[in-house]
Image: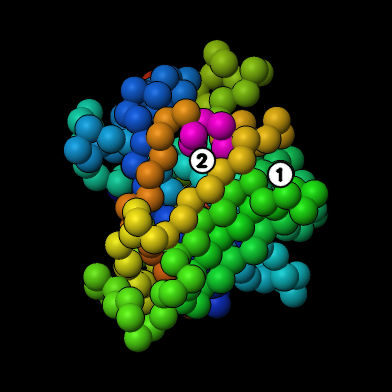
Amino acid sequence: MNTTVKYIATITNVREVSLLGTADLNFWKGHLKQIEVYLTERDGKAQLLISAVDSQYKGIRFRELSIGVYVCRHKNGAAQDGFYLVHAVNSSRLFALIERKCFSTPYYYGNIHVNDQLPASIHFLKNKDVLLRAEMSAETGASNREPSHSEENKWEGPIFLPVNDREKKDHGKVFFAKVGGHTHFYPFSSSKDVVAITPSPGSPILAWLIESGFSGKEWIIRGNATHARSKTFRRNSERGSWPNATQ
């Protein structure tokens, strides 16, 4: 991908906790038919990411949760070339509104808690009910849980957006994002770590996570990340083709 894309917003000093997991491949192929991209496949599973951040933009503090599926340029590929953003939540009503109206992204208001210190955790609440809880074991500490590896890590690529009813005959929309910083990777402990999900009518993605058998695989933690994004583009090339970053 040509990296001359223009980023219109950059946020530094982002505290970020993400949980990479796997889910049923055919389930998510069905949900992504509308944008006609290939899913990233590893060991016959789709690759999903639940990511939460705590930061500020133009002096406004906010927390954010995004849930999506990695996609690939090539069929049956394992590369994480792009990302399909299924659902997102922002603790700022203003930012959630701006995202939906100005960038066509699936953002909604919600209460998010994120802790990037061990034991790391992500909580998504609605009316004081915890709808999504992802937590390292309470006994986790720096002295007894070493990362599998730590490195300067960066991801950059297109973020595909859901196609609404008015866009069904269109190619959908996309923006470009860049995320980077010193990163710690920890294996998810299926016997000790927790992912608890409660379905909610206002957030169908939660039921989809359950139905597709989401299972945590790896924690990805950045204590001082940089996030950048482009404006949103309408995909004007042949349906199903990979977007050009020079738009």
Which residue is the site of mark 1? 108
Q: Quadrant of residue 54?
A: bottom right
Residue located at (51% from left, 31% from top): 208
Which type of secondary structure does the marked residue at label 1 adopt?
strand
- Crowding around mark 1 (Cα neighbors within 10 Å: few <14, some 14 to 19, many 20+) is many
Q: Amino acid at mark 1?
A: Tyr
Q: Quadrant of residue 71?
A: top left
Query: Between marks 2 and 1, how big is the CA–CA gap?
Result: 13 Å
Where is residue 34 drawn, in percent x and y?
Answer: 47, 20
Task: Answer whether residue 209 is magenta in the image.
Answer: yes
Q: Amino acid at mark 2?
A: Leu
Left or right: residue 201 compared with residue 223: right
Q: Is residue 20 visible?
A: yes
Q: Is residue 233 above or below residue 219?
A: above
- Crowding around mark 2 (Cα neighbors within 10 Å: few <14, some 14 to 19, many 20+) is many
Which type of secondary structure does the marked residue at label 2 adopt?
strand
Range covered by the magenta-colored residues: 206-210
Residue located at (38% from left, 44% from top): 215
